[in-house]
Each structure stands twice: as C-alpha cells, then as structure tokens.
Amino acid sequence: MTMKSDSSNDVPALPRLLSTIKQPEDLKKLNRTDLPLLAQEIRDVLISRLSVTGGHLGPNLGVVELSIALHYVFDSPEDKFTFDVSHQGYVHKMLTGRAEEIHTIRTYKGLNGFLLRTESEHDCYGAGHAGTAVSAALGMASARDLVGGKNNVVAVAGDAAFTCGTTLEALNNIAETSKKFIVVLNDNEWSIDRNVGAMAKYFNNLQTSSTYSAVRKKTADIVEKIAGYGARQFAHKIERGAKNLLMPNVLFEKFGVRYFGPVDGHDINMLIDTFSYLKEQEEPVVLHIITEKGRGYKPALDNPGKFHGLGAYKIEDGTTAAASTPTYSEIFGRHLTDFAKKDEKITAITAAMPGGTKLDIFKKEVNERYFDVGIAEEHAALFACGHACEGLRPFLTIYSTFMQRAYDMIIHDIALQNLPVRLCMDRAGLSGDDGPTHHGLFDIGYLRHVPGIIHMQPKDEDEFVDMLWTMANYDDGPTAIRYPRGAGVGATPKSEPQILEIGKAELLQEGTDVCLIGLGEMFDMAVQTKDKLEALGYSVTLINPRWIKPLDAAMITKFASQSKVVCTFEDHVLMNGFGASIIELLHDHDIPTHVERIGWPDEFVEHGKVPVLREIHGLTVEDALKKIQRHLQ
C-alpha cells in the first residue's frame, strides 16, 4: 500500500524481523522463538513513530503479543478479526502490509487511526465506538454458517466493552446463533479511564482469585496427563464445577459460551497454543486474557489514561507540549465543579470519559455527585432522566459523536417528558486526526427538530461559561450545548457569569450589503470575512447567533431582509445544519434574500489536520468571499 501523507518527517527503516513481514503469511514463516523479538521491534516502532503523529499508544502496546498470535494461528483475510473500537488495531495494520506506512497514522491521506474497510482487505469491519465487535462478528459467523463456510471469526473486545449494552445483547444471542465463534476478552482494567461498575469488579475478582488460579492449574495438569477426548471433557467438568463453587453466577457459561482463562496475554507461546486449540472447537468460546495497557513503555504504564490517545510526545519521558490556553473541556470541568459547590442539585454524569471531558476535576472535588456509568450512553441518558425527575440538575457530558447513541432517549425520555437534562457535547465539530468516527458533525441535525429543546454554541470561552450558567439555572426543559475540541480564542471568563436571554442573538455590527452569521468557533472566520468585505467597500452586518434553537427570528429576519446576501458559518454538515435553519426561517417569512453556507459537505469527512481539511472542503474565508461576491456583482 502506498499513500501520500501530510507527515513529511524522515522515517528510519523498519527493524530486521518486522521489515520482512509484508503480509500475514510472512509472519508464519518465522520461528516461534523469534516472535518475542518481533514483539519488541513492534513496540519500538510504535513508540518512535507515534511520538511524531500521536495516537492510541497505550492500547496498542498492550495487544502486541495478542495480534501476533492471532495472525500466526489464523488466516486473514479469510478468517475474520473484529476489534472493539479498533483503536488498538495498529499492530494488526503492521502485520497486514502496512508497517511501512505506520508513520502516517492519523495524518491526511495516511493510515486511519481505526480500522477501515476501504483501507485493507484485512480490515473486515470498521469501527470507532465501543460495543461493536461481538455483535458484528456474530453476524459474520451467522452469515458463514448460512452459506456453509468453514472460516473462523474472532471478536476482540476489551473488558470495558462488556459494560456496553450492545455487547451484553450479543452475548445473550451467541449460543442460539452460531456453534463456532471465538470472543477474546482483553482485560486490562482500563477503557480510557479505569473501568467502573459490577462487570469491571467481576473481571478483576476473577483474575485476582488465587483459589481459582490454583484450580485452573490443577485442571490443566489433569488435561496434560490424561489422554483422550473423554478425559479432556472430564477435566473441563472439574474446572467448570470449581468455578461455580467459587462464583455461582459464572457469567459466560450461564450464557452458553464456554469460558477459558484467564491467561497471560503477553505469553506468545501460550496464546498460540490456546488459539490453535480453540479454532478446532465446534462451540462458542470466550478466551479471557490479562494484558497491560502501555506495556513496554514506562510513561504509558505510569499514566494509562493520558497514553490511551494523545498527540506528539517526547520519547524519553512521554511529556507533551503544554497548551498556551485552557481547552473548552478544561473550562467546562473547572466551572461546572465551581457551580456544583454553590448548588447542591447539580450532578455530573459521563459514559467512561472523565479525562476527555475533564469531569475528573468534578470527580476529585465533588465526588458524591459525580457518576461514571461506563461505556453505556443510553443508560447514562436515562440515569440523567431519573435525576431530573427527582429535582436534581444533571449535566450529561458525552462527546457529540457518542451522544448519537442516546438519540432515542433524547427524544422519547428527555424531550417528550420535558425533563431538564443538560446535554453537554464535547468535541462538537471536526475532530481532526481521529477521523469520521469521531467528528461531531451531526448534532445540530439530530437535535434541532426535537420539540422543546434549547440548543446553543458559544463564540468564545467567556460566553461558554455564561451558557453553562444559564443551563444550570434553567429548569423548564432540556438544554444542549456544543463546544469544540481544543482551546478557544483566549477570552477570559468573567468572575461572575451572566444568565443569557434564551433565543437572543448578539449583534456586533449593522450593515446593508451582506449579513454574516458565524456560529460558535466559526465566528472568527465570519469576522475575517467581514474585514475582507469592508476592505472591498461593502457594508456588513455581523451576528453571533448563540442559539441554534430557538433562533433570534426578529434579528435575523430584519437584517437578512435589508441585505443582498446572507452567509452562515458552521462547524457541522450543511445538510440539516444551522445554515439550513436560516434558509427555512427566511422562507417562512417570505424573505427572498439568498443564503450562502460555509460548512461541511454531505459525506463522511476523512481524517487529517483541521486547517488542511477546511482548505480541501471549502471552509475558508476565500471560499466565503467567492460565494458572497457572486451576489454583489
């Protein structure tokens, strides 16, 4: 595979063993005694290359031996591997012909940071959200059985994925669907942050039980000493009975899925032997492996949360460049925590993202009102409904791309019952390097038609805090706020936030030729466009809309009617986006002024640096001027 990437750094040659692997068949030519050295080479390359591009270093360091063993035993692409979330698929990419390109990961035209069906025939299923691997793989196994196929299907899911409702739904369906199916439970006690909930405790108790480990060893000894199928079955019965004595509700076998493990996920020989055995079984099985997130790199072991996914770093100590201004997430975490100290009704709810959303600040200082429900967005939304029903003021904080999973709850449970749940959507807009699975480009479209909801986006940090304060003091129904990844413009929030008038836009300047409406972080592009137009002699109106819903109909219709053209700016898809709502507003008021829109096209936007993608897709001042001037000449 050859790709032209925006990563232009000099890249050293691959180490000896890794350089010989162009396809999985090459891996099988190596002696098993060489595989630990290959694992070290892969780790060295990951640590070196990702120090430049950034990426999901910790998860991939943890699955090196697992990935090698899978490709050593099975035959991709005939045999299918699905990886939950697939952020831990870098090693899989390296073993399937993409090692030479790993330095391009997450760069424009380079390798995607997740598995992508269009990138390689070995990526049988693309992903980016948790809870996908088991269901999708089970569907593949079912399809294989229907056509009489003989290939193997393996789903690799982290322990955090088992807090996901979809994974449990799939688990409930396995025994009734396929007789030949392998699930690998990759247990490292972490998703992004440390795992929470009963499932996490279950796995931890299981892997740390000395009694269970002793029983497993004795059972394995019996299997080794007694030959024959009947003896092996007898040994399995002993093992299964011992587990039930220790834990009456052994999860997997209650679902009709045979359980193996836990085993050392960094012992390549044991993994190869185990997979060789499991691939011959005509029954659904779960292999529980124990791994270390960040294995082989001390900074990643010391700080698994940070090294789950990060930007460029120094190899020597793992340090990253300090931001010059606080991010929107940091401002959110700090100010919501301060609000909660003044208002005992405020609660904070997240779905396994305390670090990314910066609710870790809230957790540390107001722990009794902080709730991490695990990777379970639907449950998080319903849980927030319960808080609202009882008079609390819940802030449900989830990335825009993950909030989509709770869409039914937003309509059926929050909006229909007019509950004052506060939806806080981090990473709204383009998420750059993470690509299409993580871009928050759809939340305006999926929220603006929901009756009764109030939706807003700030132009800067000061207005952001005012909006959060407004949400905290609004109890008449659901509210939502979208805000971008990264830092803002450097506006310092006031010492005392103000409650904003809902539905009232901010008029910055009046004009007669052009009306510019810049939403959120795109407001700065509207300002730059205004300056260019004024330099050309045009009179410009500049509006900060603040409110996506309800719109300030009076202000917008007034200045649109006296202008020759309106231009909207949004970090969202144009289809059913903010600009579309302006077109609808003017149509409903019989205002014929033409509306030009700057925003993202009706397609899944690729990964890459935000300025590069904006240039490619026409989200620039120059593109806005071209569109506007057509109506002024």
Image (cartoon, rainbow, N blue to C red):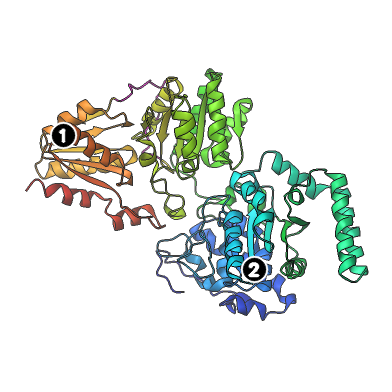
Q: Residue furthest left?
A: 633
Q: Is residue 250 above or below residue 264?
A: above
First along the sequence among labels 1 and 2: 2
Kind of residue at badge 1: Ala
Residue 157 rendering spot, x and y as whole percentages: 64, 54
Seen from the viewer's position, the closer of residues 451 and 478 is 451
**Disc nearest the viewer among 1 and 2:** 2
Seen from the viewer's position, the closer of residues 297 and 124 is 124
Q: Quadrant of residue 122?
A: bottom right
Residue 358 rendering spot, x and y as whole percentages: 53, 37
- The reply to whether residue 303 is in sight is no
Alpha-carbon span between mark 1 and mark 2: 61 Å
Left or right position of 149 against 627: right
Q: Is residue 385 above or below residue 522?
A: above
Seen from the viewer's position, the closer of residues 453 and 571 is 453
Residue 428 rendering spot, x and y as whole percentages: 41, 42
Kind of residue at badge 2: Asn
Q: Identify the disc placed on residue 82.
A: none
Q: Main secondary structure of the magenta part?
A: loop
Q: Give the structural element (helix, strand or loop) at label 2.
A: loop
Circle 1 is placed at which residue position? 560
Determine the residue positioned at 75% across, 64% down: 267
Q: Is residue 39 above or below residue 167?
A: below
Left or right position of 143 against 36: left
Residue 540 rendering spot, x and y as whole percentages: 15, 37
Determine the residue positioned at 50% across, 66% down: 103
Seen from the viewer's position, the closer of residues 371 and 78 is 78
Circle 2 is placed at which residue position? 152
* Residue segment shown in magenta: 488-503
